[in-house]
Image (cartoon, rainbow, N blue to C red):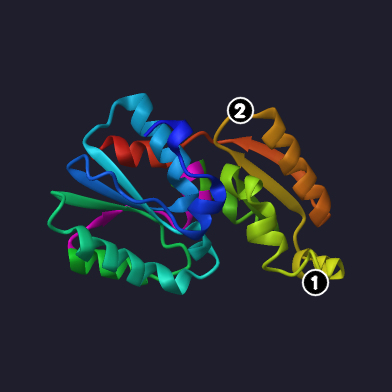
Amino acid sequence: MSDSNLPDDRTLTQEGLAPTRAGRILLIACGALAREILDLKAANGWSHLDLTCLPAKYHLYPEKITQAVCDTVAKHRADYDDFFVVYADCGTGGGLERACEEMGVQMVAGPHCYSFFQGNESFAKTSEDEITTFYLTDFLVRQFEAFIVKPMGLDRHPELRDMYFGNYEKLVYQAQTDDPALTQKARDCAARLGLTFERRFTGYGDLQTALRDL
């Protein structure tokens, strides 16, 4: 799938992405990772990998993720030789990992995408000193209104900002790409939340390594 055929962020948020049924291994991912995974597929010629994405809005409802992944595996079990889940724990409290073990399906390592984008080993070393840090990825910068502002009611009640973010000090934008416009938007997000700003170029981190080994 070329970038021009990639659904827009709103579709990836609400509906996800259907598989093409081409490839031996089906990647089951969050819609927030669609662009990055398809870019990696195209750059590396990974034609043996197909991709389907669950709605990115499950980022806000992690209790839905485990069952949705299980349903997707069951639905496509006869269509692929294997599956790989491109979700970290993502707030499932270990439920997704247990379900994957029961199904005999591998998943990407890490507690969440912020960790595997930075690199799980690196993130583990820095996270203890960054407990007052709020993280955004490329997708979450583009979808800042849909995933941060509106769910928290900040569009209707901006005075809630300090209640939600008063204990945070810094916003770290984990950049997967070099995009000056996106960097400026991330800077604006930090200002809106009253946080200092840091851009940290991560590229694809451990996501690239995990997919390369399939």
Q: Position of residue 181 (x, y in %)?
A: 71, 32
**Is 82 left, or right, of 132 in this rendering?**
left
Q: Quadrant of the N terminus?
A: top left
Tell me the number on the disc at residue 178. Answer: 2
**Rendered view: 193 above or below 142:** below
Tell us which disc is closer to us: 1 or 2: 2
Q: Which mark is residue 163?
A: 1
Image-based side of 48 in relation to 131, left or right: left
Residue 17 visible in image: yes
Q: Is residue 131 visible?
A: no
- Circle 1: residue type: Met
Membership of 133 in magenta stretch: no
Mark 2 falls on what kind of element?
loop
Q: Which residues are magenta?
A: 104-117
- Percent position of residue 138, x then y: 59, 42
Q: Give whichever of 171, 60 is nearer the camera.
A: 60
In the image, residue 90 above or below residue 136: below
